Amino acid sequence: MKFQVDVKRTSRKKTASRKIEQGVVQVIVPQNLPQKEIDDLLKQKSDWIRQKVIIQQSVPASKPKELSPVNPSLIWDATTD
């Protein structure tokens, strides 16, 4: 299984982190981390990534909640009566 990877380099990070959203792997790494280390990280975590992508694909997407028109600090589901 192939997956899309989005690499974000930032000076604010000291370690690499990863997350998966909507089937896209987001890797956030320190600015000066070599590409080879990013590739190694993805290889090491490839089984975990595949598992999470499969789980996300099998779960139906949830619709966003709406703010209550009466009290904006409350969240409510507009489909319930």
Image (cartoon, rainbow, N blue to C red):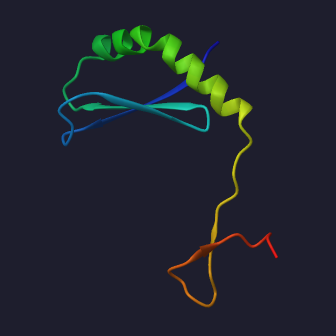
- Residue shown at 58% from the left, 19% from the top: 51
Q: Residue furthest bottom?
A: 70
Between 34 and 29, the residue placed more toward the observer is 29
Task: Determine the image quadrant of residue 22.
Answer: top right
Task: Determine the image quadrant of residue 59.
Answer: top right
Q: Position of residue 1 (x, y in %)?
A: 65, 12
Q: Quadrant of the C terminus?
A: bottom right
Q: Position of residue 71 (x, y in %)?
A: 56, 87
- Residue shown at 71% from the left, 46% from the top: 61
- Residue shown at 22% from the left, 32% from the top: 31
Task: Determine the image quadrant of residue 54.
Answer: top right
Between 22 and 38, the residue placed more toward the observer is 22
The answer to whether residue 68 is left or right of residue 30 is: right
The correct choice, above or below, for 48 with respect to 62 in the image is: above
| Count of numbered marks | 0
The correct choice, above or below, for 68 with respect to 14 in the image is: below
Q: Position of residue 21 (x, y in %)?
A: 55, 38
- Residue shown at 22% from the left, 29% from the top: 15
